[in-house]
Amino acid sequence: MSGVIAVHVGAGSHSSSLKGDYKLLCKRACKEAIGVLQQGGSALDAVCVATQVLEDSPLTNAGFGSSLTSDGNVECDASIMDGRSLRHGAAGAVPGVKNPILLARQILDAQAQPLTGGLVPPSFLTGTGAQTWAGSHGVETCEPRDLIAEKSQRIHEESVRQIQRLEERGGKRRRHILPEEQEEMQGALLDTVGAVCVDGAGYVASAVSSGGLLLKHSGRVGQAAVYGCGCWAENNCEGSGLNISVSTSGCGEHLIRTMFARLCAQSAIDPQPLGTKLVDSINTNFLESGFLEGIQHRMAGSLILRHCPSSATTDLYWLHTTRTMGVGFMTTADTKAQAHFSELPSERIGGTVNMQFKSFGAGVASTSGAGVGQEEEEEEEEHEERSGSEEEQPG
């Protein structure tokens, strides 16, 4: 069978002027991951490589270019899960690690190696302890300020000034600028990038990485590092015979309180035509969840891969309650990756699920459609033709 890789660049509010660059980045991440699969790499290898590409771009809120904390630093969250072994590795609020997903992968791999005296290897490390562990296990570290992009610094300074103006007017201090207060800041509220994959052997894996919310408190850990909330991968999910992997995005606090990644995996086991059962489950267990009592706008996004070994078919779903979500995907049988953005009207943000899907027969794309909401038609390949890498695009 052919392998399938899919990536996302967050569920949030993407700048229209940068959508072409985001699509190009998604395609490049997919191509790098497909190269890994074509050379015999595993799904776990592929999601790690794809997420690393996304982290390295200043466009995304992950790794280099992450949103800054209230005191002006970068602290990243990341996790990765192997559907075959069911191991999960995570790092939270970690400073000075160039690629947090590589740290999460190293933490996952180290769990297979017993420690002297029966000590238990960690599955989740945070803060400077995680940074120290990274340096002693071959993961590249750097000066924390090396991860601050010019764009992130500018947005942080503008956001701090906006907070000060609100306080001067007697407004209450908030952790981030709400969309209705400052549309320009919405791009900085984008959370989480990630990837899902099924390899040629049918095994699945998932990964997620995030710089967290703009102006978050130092030490805050979002869903990207939390088990069952940021990503999920499980072969024979819940005994269903289906292999499912999930990577989430949105407001971390909302996703943690609903264990959103595992919720999506469970909801995808038996979807009705067009994924209507999946949408119904998200409506019931997220938008109408009692665990989110008092929250008016509930922000989430998810990329879900569902592989059926018996039929050698793979279904890919992406859904969000935010204004936009950007995704890319590619199979080992393809010569080009595809990238798409889906969008919700402003009056439906935080209260409606927009779901899109694509089905692959034996790894070859066969059908596509929209469950709820709108999907933008993919533009011609002019972005890909005019440049070989996302960094060459004007910012």
Image (spheres, rainbow, N blue to C red):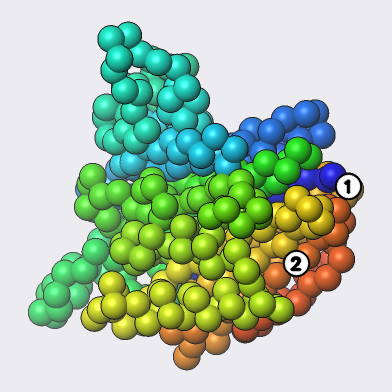
Residue at (70% x, 78% y) in the render: 274
Residue at far bottom of view:
347
Residue at (66% x, 53% y) in the render: 241
Answer whether labels 1 and 2 touch (C-beta < 8 Å).
no
Q: The N terminus is located in which quarter?
A: top right
Residue 194 spot, x, y in % from top left: 55, 50
Residue 49 spot, x, y in % from top left: 63, 36
Which residue is denoted by mark 1 in the rendering?
Answer: 333
| The label number, if any, that marks residue 358 in the structure image | 2
Image quadrant assignment for residue 121: top left
Image quadrant assignment for residue 128: top left
Q: The C terminus is located in which quarter?
A: bottom right
Label 2 SS: strand
Decide which of 379, 120 is in the foreground and name it: 120
Q: Amino acid at mark 1?
A: Ala
Decide which of 299, 259 is in the foreground and name it: 259
Label 1 SS: loop
